[in-house]
Image: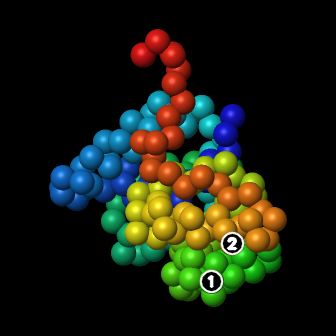
Amino acid sequence: MARVYIETSFFSACVTDRSGEKIVGWRASSNEWWKTQRRCHDIFISGEVIRELSAADFPNRDKALALLTGLNMLELTLEVERLADLMVREKVMPAPAVGGDAVHVAAAVTHRMDYIPTWNVKHLANPNKRAHFAVICMRLGLVPPQIVTPDMLQELEDASD
C-alpha cells in the first residue's frame, strides 16, 4: 500500500459548499476518492492539517474535522521544522515556514510518504514547483513524494474497468 499524506485542500474540497464549476468538480472528485480509494492506501495527516481545519473561520469545520477520525498522525519533529524552513528559504514553498504548505511538504518528505494528493495547484501540484522541490530533495539525499491531484491517484480495483 502506498503511504499517502493528505493535506488540507483535499479535506476542504470534500466539505465545501461553494458552487463554482471547478470547485464542484473538485468536491465530487474528492468525495469519490475518499469513498473508493482511501482503503487502498495508508493515509496520514499531521497536526498542521488539524490546525488549519480547526481555524474558527474555516467553513464547515466540524464536517472537515470529522473526516480525520482514525487517520495516522505524522509527528512534526525538529527535522520537519528544519526542512520546512529550508523549503521557504529556497523559495520552493511560500512563507511562513512554521505553517502551511512548507510544513505539509516537509512532513511528507521526512516521514517518507509516497504521495501528496492536493488541490493546491499554485504551490504544490505545480510542475515548476514539483521540479524545484525534487531538486532540493535530491541535494539532501531525500526522496520526494509525488505531488498529484486526487484524481491522478487511483488504484484500480478491477483492471477490466
Please tell me the numbered disc located at residue 28.
none
Residue in the picture at 64% in, 64% down? 134
Secondary element under disc 1, as helix, strand or loop, is: loop
Locate residue 77, reporting x and y percent: 78, 72
Q: Quadrant of the C terminus?
A: top left
Q: Nearer the viewer, residue 17 or 126?
A: 126
Locate residue 99, reporting x and y percent: 58, 78
Q: Is residue 96 above or below residue 161?
A: below
The amino acid type, in three-letter code, at marker 2 is Ile
Locate residue 127, reporting x and y percent: 47, 62
Residue in the picture at 55% in, 37% down? 38
Secondary element under disc 2, as helix, strand or loop, is: helix
Q: In the picture provided, is 26 more to the left or to the right than 146? A: left
Residue in the picture at 49% in, 68% down? 128
Locate residue 72, reporting x and y percent: 68, 50
The residue identified by callout 2 is: 136
The amino acid type, in three-letter code, at marker 1 is Glu
Answer yes or no: do the residues labelled 1 and 2 have beta carbons within 8 Å? yes
Residue in the picture at 68% in, 59% down? 144
Q: In the picture provided, is 153 more to the left or to the right than 136? A: left
Q: Is residue 28 above or below residue 113?
A: above
The residue identified by callout 1 is: 90
